Image (cartoon, rainbow, N blue to C red):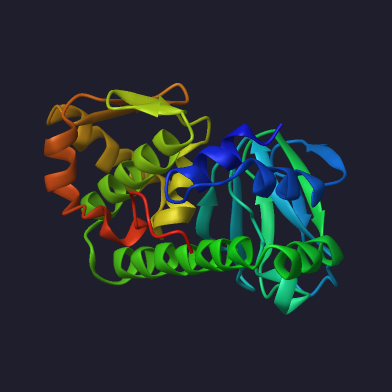
Amino acid sequence: MIDRHLMKLRARYSISQIEEAAIRESLTEVARYPADHTAIRAGEVLTFSTLLLDGLMTRYKDLSDGQRQITEIHVPGDFADLHSFTLKHLDHNVMTLTPCKIVKSPHDRIQKLCEEHPRLGRIYWFSTNLDACIHREWEVSLGRRSALERTAHLLCELQVRLGIVGLATGNGYALPITQADVAECLGLTPVHVNRVLKELRETGLVEFRNGRVTIHDIEGLKRAAEFDPTYLYLGQRERG
């Protein structure tokens, strides 16, 4: 059930069988949500954190005029709101982009996990820090990168993050969302995103069509994005 979560953890840390058993023990109720379902609302008191098993989820904030800004896409294996363990409520919403399967981790079980396995506590602390790293990179895109650069950067990031959990190759990955969803990630209009995707396709770098990203030139796409994956802290780290 949590194979992709373990893949994500083991991409950076060794996880023993005892630690794996403790992680599994911390999880309880499995739930399924349809696409475009707000699973967690800002201000809602939370007693559990949500681990995404299948599908794509997103964090977002709404403006009074109805505009929405997506601040991160979560892929299978991610906790969508692990930071709610300490915050107890969120200042933003968490929504499904596609049909999703999740499993809940009650906060009292997370507390027990951290107390009995402090190394896992540090590993999950790293996970929340990694979310902050991704948020900073998205902020740079929104503030300084051109429309083409920020689009290419998002596609590069997802190729890496989905690849870690076995859902992408160097040639592409499934991305069953709309251009309007992409626009809300990038702070652009759907029309602008359509023009950028056309340019990326015509220059032979990448194609996004029918819910799939097909990468024709990964190195060229990285150059167009000035993509440096350092912020994703890839590779094995110390034991924690």
In the rendered image, residue 68, in percent from the top left (x then y), is placed at 57, 61
Front-lying residue, 12 or 177: 12
Where is residue 151? Give x, y as percent.
Answer: 30, 48
Vertical placement of residue 99 versus 80, above or below: above
Residue at point 33%, 42% (across, down): 155
For the point 32% across and 61% down, which residue is it? 231
Residue 4 rendering spot, x and y as whole percentages: 57, 35
Task: Name the residue nearer the viewer: 209 or 76.
Answer: 76
- Residue 213 visible in the current orientation: no
Q: Position of residue 177 (x, y in %)?
A: 52, 35
Image point (27%, 40%), residue name = 195
32 over 192 or under it: above or below: above
| The quarter of the displayed image where residue 54 is located | top right
Vertical side of 100 occupied by 157: above or below: below
Quarter occupied by the N terminus: top right
Q: Would residue 203 be found to the left or right of residue 68 on screen?
A: left
At x 44%, y 46%, the residue is 182
Note whether residue 196 is visible.
Answer: yes
Location of residue 138 by image quarter: bottom left
Query: In the rendered image of this protein, does residue 30 appear above or below residue 22?
Result: above
Say whether residue 94 is left or right of residue 231. right
